Amino acid sequence: MYCRACWSTWVSGVQVGIAGVQGAQGLQTTHAVSGGRTFIWRSDLATARRVFERPVQQGPGLHRYPGTGAGTGTGTGPSRGPRSGHGVGPGSLPGILVVVPSWGQRCGVAEYTRFLVDELRAQGFTAEVARGQDDEIFSLMRRGGFHVVHVQFEYQLFKPGQLRRLVRQLKARGIRVIATVHDFLPGQVAANSLIKDEFSQVIVHSTRLRDELSRLGINLERIHLIPMGCPRVALSDESAVRASLGVGPGPALGYFGFALPQKGIIELAVAAKALRETVFPHLKVYAFAAPAFFGSGYAGELAAFLAGAGLAEGFVLRRDYLPVQDVVNFLHAMDINVLPYKEMAYVGTSSAVRILMAAEKPIITTDIPYFDDLDGEVYKIPSADPAHIAEAVLYLMANPAKREEMVYRIRRYVEAHNWAQIAGQHARLYIHLAAIAVGGWPSGSGVGAGEAMAAAGEPTYTAWEGNGPPRVAAVPNQVWERVVRRFGRGG
């Protein structure tokens, strides 16, 4: 099924001229003006939690439900939310059933689901996972309390006809069925028709994927942009980890992800050999590349190819499936981490780069749709050509200030998009959908997702009326840090 990867460009002796251009990275503030009033988006998590802790209020045809607040949790993580009950109402949260057929296997979507479910449980939700078999799902449904079924959709995990039948059966029972669409292939007609017609709401991770689904004919009111979550890991002593790995005088480059042909691992090995022969004789590459469950044979082919092509020297290929904590600390011991993915025929979002971000080291990626949602947090190269990889490594190694800036941006990104934050965004959507399921908002009432969130107590904006510039009530700390960094405290 999987063909041997090949590389198209070999550079014998890299001669690189670097012209470093550093552009000022400014901050953008988006304003919406309506009826002479300026609306400013408020995304303060503490505010959202306080809103969720409000008592249930009722009005004509409207019910408000609490969300994640202080209380006793039921999950494996720290207790931060009220105990979830079977049903939706005061003091309880809706039960969530997540469907992912690859649960328990070496699969990026399954790993994503595990992070989400663990954090939902920590925030007080009853969250269960099913692999998609009808009898398993309806057995859980009979236990009661599940008003939302959340499908983790990826094309090779589902057969469209079977999934369509399941979704319709669930909807006939009053269940709200939503999907996270992890990637998009325009040519998959049956599956794309299913996404368009059957799911009440769709979650995507990037504006690029949102735009693709919009062109498919899905109303933007049904599409929710929720970024991929980033894990937060306690980092070990870097020098000790480098010693345990045998890094030596370095430098060291890291890679993390499944061993697949499109990931550019061979191109990284070619670039590393050229760098060792010309600039960095002690350079090593540590590729943590476990086999994927759907392409397990390629990892062995890759190891054999590297050895046969003379690319194995200084290239450490780890094929064991390691815990995230270990991987992050290994990557933290690297000087630079690299994801040289090749252009692919589908639109998706990288989960592996979030693991790299947790390691807080500079990251090189290719400039392809998989990394569209990232900007200054990563250093993008035009392609996986070994010359481009080598140029980027040389540039970053020669510019410590650039590396420091990238690490700063990475830390700020992880603060804003860690799994606690991302699960909180899911929680608000679940509460809204569960309220519809139990009759809080009648189906077809014309109430959009934004209005429903506002009605449920979620402040989507703060109105400002006055003559001077608007004052933001709650500015995230990282914004002030950037302002002070650029202009000084008196600026």
Image (spheres, rainbow, N blue to C red):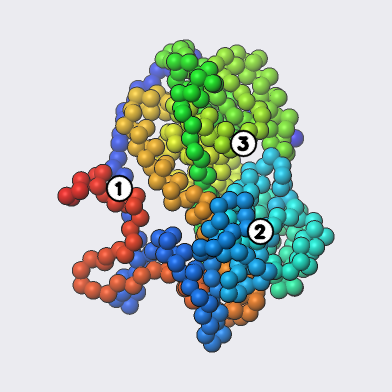
Against 421, is 39 above or below? below
Mark-to-mark CA distance, 3 and 2: 22 Å
Residues packed near mark 2 inside 10 Å, few (<14), some (14 to 19) or many (20 plus): many
Cβ–Cβ below 8 Å for labels 2 and 1? no
Which numbered disc, 3 or 2, marks the residue that appears first in the sequence? 2
For mark 2, what is the residue? 127
Q: What element carries label 3?
A: loop
Residue type at numbered disc 1: Glu
In the image, 71: left or right of 378?
Answer: right
In the image, 146: left or right of 46?
Answer: right
Residue 107 percent location from the top left of the image? 67, 42
In the rendering, which numbered label is found on residue 462? none
Q: Can residue 34 be seen in this view?
A: yes
In the image, 83: left or right of 475?
Answer: right
Residue 374 percent location from the top left of the image? 45, 45
Q: Can residue 366 be seen in this view?
A: no
Residue 230 percent location from the top left of the image? 51, 46
Which numbered disc, 3 or 1, marks the residue that appears first in the sequence? 3
Callout in the foreground (2, 1): 2
Q: What element carries label 2?
A: strand
Determine which quarter of the picture holds residue 179: bottom right
For mark 3, what is the residue? 323
The number of discs equals: 3
Residues packed near mark 1 inside 10 Å, few (<14), some (14 to 19) or many (20 plus): few
The residue sitting at the left extreme is: 490
For mark 1, what is the residue? 481
Quarter holding the N terminus? top right
Which numbered disc, 2 or 1, marks the residue that appears first in the sequence? 2
Against 325, is 199 above or below? below
Against 21, is 10 above or below? above
Residue type at numbered disc 2: Ala
Q: Which residue is drawn at 45% across and 18% down?
A: 250
